[in-house]
Image: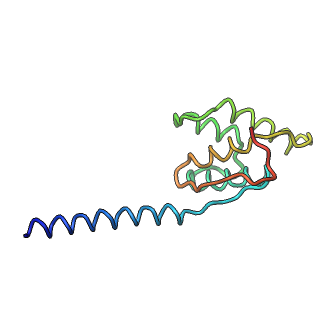
Amino acid sequence: MTLFYSLVLANIVVYLLAVAGVVRAMLRKTVHVGSVEDAFAVLEKALRASYPDLPEGFTWNEVLTRLKSSKQDLSWREIDQTLRKYEAYRYGGVACPDINVSAVLRLAQSLPKGERYVTGSKVQSN
């Protein structure tokens, strides 16, 4: 009889842990990103949360160099191209090109302490 109650108790604990995991996943904050500027703001926020030692006024190239050395399995070529397009748009006065916001959000999400991000309907992505 003791074995029966032990198994019932173990079963209850397993179910409670499963429910807690589902609730936690549902409560994770999801941020909707509607523009290129928003996507890079999300990336910057994620970078600051993950790497609090980043110097003030860091450049995107410094960050990419640091992240590439972390051996994350991401499409670095795609991220490099996206960054170049964004810099041309932001600092070079070039009209807003078709920037792959999804690549930026995947990078932000891959960082420790990341949140979930989804693109808004206004943003084109490849």
Which residue is depicted at the point 8% across and 69% down?
Answer: 2
Quadrant containing the C terminus is top right
Q: 44 left or right of 115?
A: right
Which residue is depicted at the point 21% across and 69% down?
Answer: 9
Number of numbered discs overlaid on the protein picture: 0
Quadrant containing the N terminus is bottom left
**Place of residue 31 in the rendered image (x, y in percent of width and height, measured from the top left):** 66, 60
Residue 4 vs residue 110, the one in the foreground: 4
Residue 77 vs residue 70, the one in the foreground: 77
**Place of residue 62 in the rendered image (x, y in percent of width and height, measured from the top left):** 66, 39
**Place of residue 83 in the rendered image (x, y in percent of width and height, measured from the top left):** 75, 38
Q: 56 left or right of 96?
A: left
**Place of residue 74 in the rendered image (x, y in percent of width and height, measured from the top left):** 59, 35
Extreme residue toward the top, this view: 77
Which residue is depicted at the point 92% across and 41% down?
Answer: 95
Image coloring type: rainbow
Residue 78 vs residue 19, the one in the foreground: 19
Which residue is depicted at the point 56% across and 54% down?
Answer: 114
